[in-house]
Amino acid sequence: MKKTVSMLFVFFVLLNCGELTRKPNERSENTSSENPKEAQVNEFAIVIHGGAGTILKENLSDEKEAEYRAKLEEAIRVGYTILEEGGTSLDAVEKTINVLEDSPLFNAGKGAVFTNAETNELDASIMDGSNLNAGASAGTKTVKNPINLARKIMENSPHVMMAGDGAETYAKEQGLELVSPEYFYVENRMQSLKRVKEKDAQKESDNASAFYDATIKDSKFGTVGCVALDKNGNLAAGTSTGGMTNKRYGRIGDVPIIGAGNYANNATCAISGTGWGEFFIRATVAHDISALIEYKGVSLKEAANEVIQKKVPALGGDGGIIAVDKYGNMEMNFNTAGMYRAAMNDKGELVIGIFKE
Ligand code: ASP
């Protein structure tokens, strides 16, 4: 009896101290003022990528490099303006990605790579960090801007992911712009497919590693992505891609898989990835980075390093991520030769990069 009474006493003391009622978020807010690394760095911020891979200075003419830089700047300024005017991170992410999807320079929307069957099959996803709502579409062939479809799926349907014909039907019902498959045709993407197929044919056996050797080595990924923090503290992430050149058998990569190529959570950060999708799925790249912050309390940089510089390469994969955390810290982290990327802080300072520094 005495024991029960004293246990009850301890319980109520703890309850009054808030130890049993405090939610994890409240705990991290309480500690943020004590920890300088958790101070608000930017009221709002935006980061974009246009794919990672074997992007080398010697393979890119000055003219082409200038074209990439100009398009990255055009895209990020669209999102930046939305955020500066008090718009939502979701709008900033969607509209910024639209600019990249409409450019043939990137492997998303117009400019998507070709499958083995010489078709273009596009994947995209978007996530709202304020409520963990998410939308994704996979393998669409006629939706002009797949990121718009991902957002409609997130906001107007009870589902998270739609694929193939069903996704196209839903896009039509939602009044999204559809195009004929020829819209996506870009000559240099077709030439890339032919080169990859030739390499493939030179291989003696058709085992998985030979296929991947021919398909992936020396490849440039080219997916596009955007992450943003808005003035209301809401994070959002979006990613859009044509997938990987010469993909077969209805292959779907990491981009439409929430937690692999894309993730956003107001409690931690927003992440968009680009790279060898199979490894990003197996390493649950985007969610892993968020989880390291949420459960281990590490910084965004430490979390990104752990996953991109250690976990993914240890499995044999490569690629990179862009991210912004709830404090406005921005991160562009890759283990490839280069990654098309740009970032803007709340003072409007712009950084654009392509190669490793
Ligand atoms: N991650 C994409 C995929 O595997 C490719 C890319 O990043 O370009 O589908």
Image (cartoon, rainbow, N blue to C red):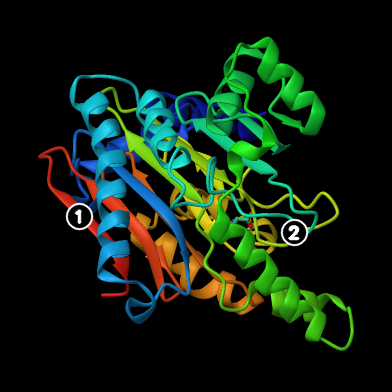
Residue 193: image quadrant is bottom right
Percent coordinates x, y for residue 240 in the rendering: 54, 42
User: What mark, if any, has residue 351 been given in the picture?
Assistant: 1
Ligand 1 shown in quarter:
bottom right
Q: Residue at x 42, y 53 (%)?
A: 50
Percent coordinates x, y for residue 301 in the rendering: 34, 61
Mark 2 vs 1, N-terminal side? 2
Residue at mark 2: C-beta within 8 A of ligand 1: yes
| Residue type, numbered disc 1 | Val
The kind of secondary structure element at disc 2 is loop
**Foreground: 58 or 131?**
58
Q: Which mark is nearer the camera, 2 or 1?
A: 2
Q: Residue at x 19, y 33 (%)?
A: 43
Can the viewer see residue 270 in this picture?
Answer: no
Q: Residue at x 39, y 52 (%)?
A: 49
Residue that sits furthest to the bottom in the current view: 204
